[in-house]
Amino acid sequence: MAKILCVLTGASYWTLKDGHRHPTGYWAEEFVAPYSVFTDAGHEVTVATPGGVVPVVDTMSLRPGMAGGEENALREEAVIEVADELRHPISLQEVRLEDYDAVYYPGGHGPMEDLSVDPDSGALLREALASGRPLGIVCHAPAALLATRDAKGDTPFANYRVTGFCNEEEAGVGFADKAKWLLEDELKELPTQYSRGPAWEPYTVVDRNLFTGQNPASSAPLAKELVEAL
C-alpha cells in the first residue's frame, strides 16, 4: 500500500480580470476519478490544502451536463460525500514529502487563484520533482507550476514536456476572454514544452516522474499511470 498526497485548492472563487469573483473550487471528476483509482488499488490518500482549509467542490462540475449525465453526477457526489479525507485536510505547510510515495494535484479553476502563487505548494512541487516520486498534475492544476519560480524567474520544470487545460477549452467554458491569464499561455512562457490533444478528449504526457493531464477526462487515465508507476 502506498501513501498518496492529494493537494487541492483552498479557493472558493477565481478573480477575473474585471474583478468579479467567480465561484469555483476543485473539479469533482478530477478528485473523484483518481481517488477511486487510488483507493480501489489499496492506496491511502491524504488531502492537503493551503492553510488546511476544507476544500469546496465547484458546483458547476456536478451539473449533469458537465459530469457526463445525471447518473455520473450523483455517483461523483456520493464519493465526495463519503471521502472523509476531504473533511480533514492537513495544511500544505505541515506536509513532509518523505511521508508519501506520490503526489497528485487535481484542478478546477481554484488553483488559478491560490496554488499559482502559493510558496508552500511551489516548494513542495520542486521537492517532489527532485525526489523522483511520481508527481501527477491535471487540467488547471499545472497553474501551480508558476509558483515554482525563484527570484530570477527560473524553475526546475523548465523544458519539461507538459499538458494542461488549453485555450480552446477555456473558450469553450466561456472564460478565455474573462480570465486575467490563460494557463496554456503561461505554461509556454514558463517555459515548458507544452502540448495538447483534441479538446475534451483524454490526453496525458509523461516526462520522467512528471505526469500531466489536459482536462477532466484525463484524470482517470493519469491516475492509472501513477498507480502503475508506484
Image: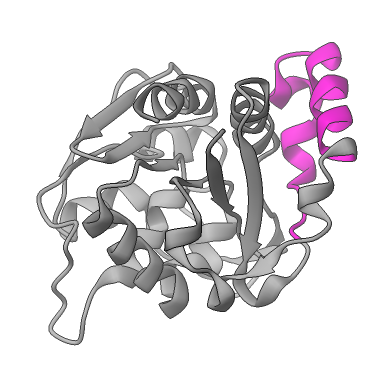
Q: Main secondary structure of the magenta part?
A: helix
Q: Locate residue 43, reporting x and y percent.
A: 61, 33
Q: Is residue 61 left or right of residue 19?
A: right
Q: Locate residue 127, reporting x and y percent.
A: 31, 65
Q: Quadrant of the C terminus?
A: top left
Looking at the image, the residue that sits furthest to the front is 1
Residue 154 within the magenta-colored segment of the rendering: no
Q: Is residue 118 visible?
A: no
Q: Is residue 171 left or right of residue 149?
A: right
Say above or below: 18 vs 226: below
Say above or below: 195 vs 181: above
Of 24 and 51, nearer the camera is 51
Which stretch appears magenta? 55-81
Q: Locate residue 213, reporting x and y percent.
A: 39, 32
Q: Is residue 117 left or right of residue 208?
A: right
Of 30 and 229, nearer the camera is 229
Q: Locate residue 57, reporting x and y percent.
A: 76, 48
Q: Quadrant of the N terminus?
A: top right
Looking at the image, the residue that sits furthest to the bottom is 151
Q: Residue at x 32, y 36 (%)?
A: 211
Residue 63 within the magenta-colored segment of the rendering: yes
Of 91 and 99, nearer the camera is 99
Q: Quarter of the image holding residue 164?
A: top left
Q: Is residue 19 left or right of residue 54?
A: left
Say above or below: 97 vs 192: below
Q: Residue at x 35, y 28 (%)?
A: 229
Q: Residue at x 47, y 20 (%)?
A: 224
